[in-house]
Amino acid sequence: MTRNIADAKDTLFAPSVPKKDRPWLFRTYSGHSSAAASNALFRTNLSRGQSGLSVAFDLPTQTALDADDVLARGEVGKVGVPISHLGDMKRLFDGIPLDQMNTSMTINAAAPWQLALLIATAEDQGVARRDLAGTTQNDIIKEYLSRGTYIFPPAPSMRLQTDVISFATLEMPKWNPMNVCSYHLQEAGAEPAEELAFAMANAITVLDMVKASGDISAEDFPQVVGRISFFLNAGIRFVTELCKARAFVELWDEITLQRYGVEDPKLRRFRYGVQVNSLGLTEAQPENNVYRIMIEMLSVVLSKNARARAVQLPAWNEALGLPRPWDQQWSLRLQQIMAFETDLLEYGDIFDGSSEITAKVDALKAQARDELARLEEMGGVVRAVEQGYMKQRLVESNARRLAAIQAGEQIVVGVNKYTECESSPLVSGVETFLTPDSEAEKSQIENLKAWRAQRDKTAVADALKQLEATARAGSNIMEASIQCARAGVTTGEWGGKLRDVFGEYRAPTGIAGAARAPMVDADALRAQINGLSDKLGTRPRLLMAKPGLDGHSNGAEQVALAARDAGFEVIYEGIRQTPVEIVSAAVQEGVHAVGLSVLSGSHLTLVEDVLKGLKEQGAADIPVIVGGIIPERDMATLKAMGVARVFTPKDFELGAMLTQVADVMAENIKD
């Protein structure tokens, strides 16, 4: 009897093993210097438990330029891996079986080309294209609004986008051909309802174009809908962000059922990956970023019905520079602890039935529907991009965000409140970020020249001729691109041929009609500018410029907008200018200072070229001011070159920054 009671007690109190849901894919956004160095990083991360790859390409690759192009100077291997030809792609995935990997490729304007290179690489591994699993971002609309790696005008760009979607739907059943990417919209200033509406409008436009193309039958069209995925941002207001994710789920189900008649609930499912917000990571007290990253991740994993399919976390030190492998490992471990140590995956949706959550979700959906209707009235997303409406909305929203931080209405710990602190051992006396190989650009150019020398020039010419004919005929570009990859065509040659066909494009800056939010100490600054104008005999002229290929123009836009409203005459032509073009504009416009914004790590090379150009034009007396993500050691180097002021993300008060710009101009007045 005693034994039976003991047995019963053992059974009663024995720990049960609950069934857990499968965790999301763990990713880190990786790539730098060279294909070989990035391959080593990929393999290291996979060995530590990463379950998918997210490839970061450098800016020349993203804009379909070869490493020896004049615009690529200083940019090769800085923010990602350079892929100039099939040999580079093979090296990138050497020893990584592509049929066992889920690969996300952050590529947009050049998505057809990089997908073609991946397919050719896989087939050389013996892997059929139908067995490849992963995603091409392939979202060109947000490039015009935020990220800036567009190449062609909107109409042909959208056509290339739909080419990839149609091809992948028919040829690559495991591949997500488009990731509607609202992540960068939030980085550019989008508020939650704007992020919802702009992303949904983007997806609607693409699906409508695919449907109208006739490439996909009516029977197969629901499969196209089911293969569209999304890539969201998750900011620090994590309750709002959680509600935004749930609103995305519900709106997408509504749109796909009512607009496209998709009856299968699985094909209406909102599938998304996420990177939590890098915009809110601070240079000041960067150790606090660990908590920000953790809190932001909660908004996309806590709610089962709106849980991300894949999560990639930034590293704590991304406001300082390129993360080291250890930093990426730290972010990966955060995901693993959440998935494997907690009981999160043992429960259903813990927010179902919450009246607060439901009310917020409903409010976000209502605001998004209003904005969707407004975009529809304007003629759709492409027209709204061409007219500058969407860009202007983002610039204004970002201006309000910055004004709230500067006024202390939006607290950022360590930046505008609780700024007194102990020194951090994480950043004291050690190299706190990865420095890309200084020889990467030279090595890539040598590699490129060797590749060109050994290939069959006739095969290259024939492949490019077929590519041009296909583009001009309006046929799907993918098979011709794959043939180019196999023939040895380079990234710049592929892009160059399509530039010949489609032309290039410069998107609206959003500055002209944007309304500026109130600025701290605005009256004192305007008085200073008026006094400077009297001394100069004209309004002080400031040339704001984005040299090189860095398309992240949010900061430059906010400085230009604030400077305009403070009384400066501002010349700002947007992104992607060569040092020669910047020098020419400075001389022709007779500016009193040049402001350069560089966030890609190429500041030393590009600033040196601008300073050299000004000297050659007899304009060395024009002061140059630089802003960007610039390590402290490089600040000293820039000042030694002759740069008048250097600003970094910790200099968030625009009024104080512009006061210094005016001081520099005043100091430069000749008696």
Image (cartoon, rainbow, N blue to C red):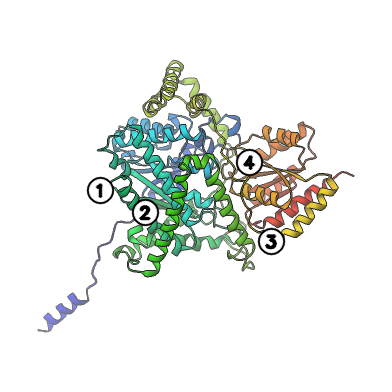
Say what amino acid the circle numbered 4 marks: Lys
Q: Quadrant of residue 579?
A: top right
How packed mark 1 is, by other alpha carbons closer than 10 Å (few <14, some 14-19, many 20 or more), is: few
342 left or right of 68? left
Rendering quarter of residue 133 = top left
Could you say where residue 206 lies in the image, as x and y percent from the top left?
40, 40
Nearest to N terminus: mark 1 or mark 2: 2
Kind of element beneath mark 4: loop
Q: Amino acid at mark 2?
A: Leu
| Circle 2 crowding by C-alpha within 10 Å: few under 14, some 14–19, many from 20 | many
**Label 2 SS:** helix
The residue pinned by badge 3 equals: 520
Measured from the top left, where is residue 456 in percent x and y?
44, 18
Image marks 1 and 4: residues in contact by CB distance under 8 Å: no
Where does label 1 land, which residue? 263
- Residue to which mark 2 is pinned: 251
